[in-house]
Image: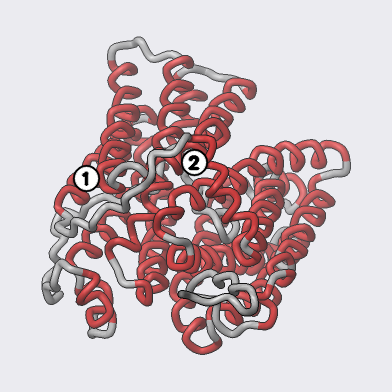
Amino acid sequence: MTAAVAPPPANPSSPASPSSPANPSSPGLPEASEAPEASGASEARSRWGLFAQRDFRLLWAGQTVSRLGSSVTTVALPLVAVLTLDAGPLAGGLLTSAIWLPWLLFGLPAGVWVGRMPRRAVMIGCNLGSAALFASVPVAGWFGVLTMAQLLAVALLSGACSVFFDAADQAYLPELVAPEDLIEGNAKLAGSGSAAEVAGRGLAGLTVQLVGAAAGLLIDAVSFLIAAGALLRIRARPEPVVHQQAAMPGQVREGLSFLLRDPYLRAFLCFGAAANFALMGYQAILALFLVREAGIAPAWVGVLASAAAVGGVLGALAARPLCRRFGTARGVRIVLLAVVPFGLLMPLAGPGAGTALYVVGSVAVVAAVVLCNIVLGSFRQSYTPPELLTRVTAGSMFAVHATIPLGALTGGVLGAVIGLRATMWVMTGLLTLSGTLPLLSPLRTLRELPAAPRRPQAPHGSGRS
């Protein structure tokens, strides 16, 4: 999971890509017009909401399948290194670093490149590339030629696919649904994704036990193929935004300038970077803390992780009603100030009844993060000018992903120096404090987040001729 401006890093090994269901046209759902610009709002007000729109159904149902496959890979890929190749801690660290390195290498230029191409074509290409990469691992294992070098290459290249896919994906949903339906759309995608992650962890254990870790990666490969098929079946063909073919540095600078000068986007960016640092800081030592300090049996650690993931489903379900009742800006304030501090219960975890403290704290944190992801991600999609959206999205992701390895490293060092429980206190305290950063923006006084950036006022006395 990540902070509010970035997609959850629960599956860092592969992009959270939309994939297709076996029968995307669910029985009983009315078929809708394929022009979301004309009918998206009326469909959202129907009994089925956005599920009445065929293109969104493909995106939603497909993404659920893909998240299920990606959850299997999250467990299976490290196990391939450990069980098949007898890798040590250094190799495991290199594998994790290879997954995240592309965000630092390609994060900023990806926004420019994706902005020059059709979003759907980029997403299909990334899905097909990821499918081939993950399928290569069991194939190499069957022929006895699998090496650590290949695993590192798969991790690095699939991470690069994730960078480009995510930049396109964030700009693609606004092309399918009306602006007023973005919160509903993101909530449905996030809710089903969180549920798929809960099921995926259980499926991963069963798959590894029955067919082995390497063969388990075939599930993710198949999910990427289904994803590509789902995207090919989407009928909407939005008009591409015409961009000036300016030099790469200038376009990157333009996107960063908009991101850093806007008071709302800047505040949310700082919150995302700080929260990711704290989240990864305690997640890096969480398993050790639960087993060695909290006295929880190792067999229960996976169960607790699944229980925490349920918070994502709760956050997705609460996002739309909360925003309707209190407004988007006020709803985010309530979550940041009243829900995130429940994370301070996690360091109090202990055996027996003390386990409940961890469960309550972790569920609250995951719910808060997912809800803020939905609301603030929808805000960015509707607020940012279309010609800048991929660059602003890529700039945001670059910044919030940059703090992930720093947080993990800091958590590990602090765990060795001051102890595991003390590190949990430090990181959950930082997470709570990070929730105050958006209040340094105009968010603190608003009920609703603005629909568009404020245009600078013309000098007094100026006018049009």
Q: Position of residue 28 (x, y in %)?
A: 12, 76
**Count the marks: how many?**
2
Q: Which amino acid is tagged 1?
A: Ile
Q: Which mark is residue 226?
A: 1
Across and down, in percent, residue 191 comes to: 41, 65
Judge the density around disc 2: few (<14), some (14-19), many (≥20) Cα neighbours within 10 Å. Answer: many
The residue positioned 57% from the left and 52% from the top of the image is: 300
The correct choice, above or below, for 91 with respect to 120 in the image is above
Question: Mark 2 sits on what residue?
Answer: 12
Structural distance between the alpha carbons of marks 1 and 2: 20 Å
The quarter of the picture where residue 69 lies is top left
- Secondary element under disc 1, as helix, strand or loop, is helix
Q: Are marks 1 and 2 in contact (CB under 8 Å)?
A: no
Find residue 394 and report its horizontal and vertical position in percent.
50, 46
Residue type for callout 2: Pro
Q: Is residue 247 left or right of residue 50?
A: right
**Is residue 231 found left or right of 197 in the rendered image?**
left
Q: Residues within 10 Å of mark 1 (few under 14, many from 20)?
A: many
The kind of secondary structure element at disc 2 is loop
Which residue, as the protein is rendered here, is positioned at the far right?
418
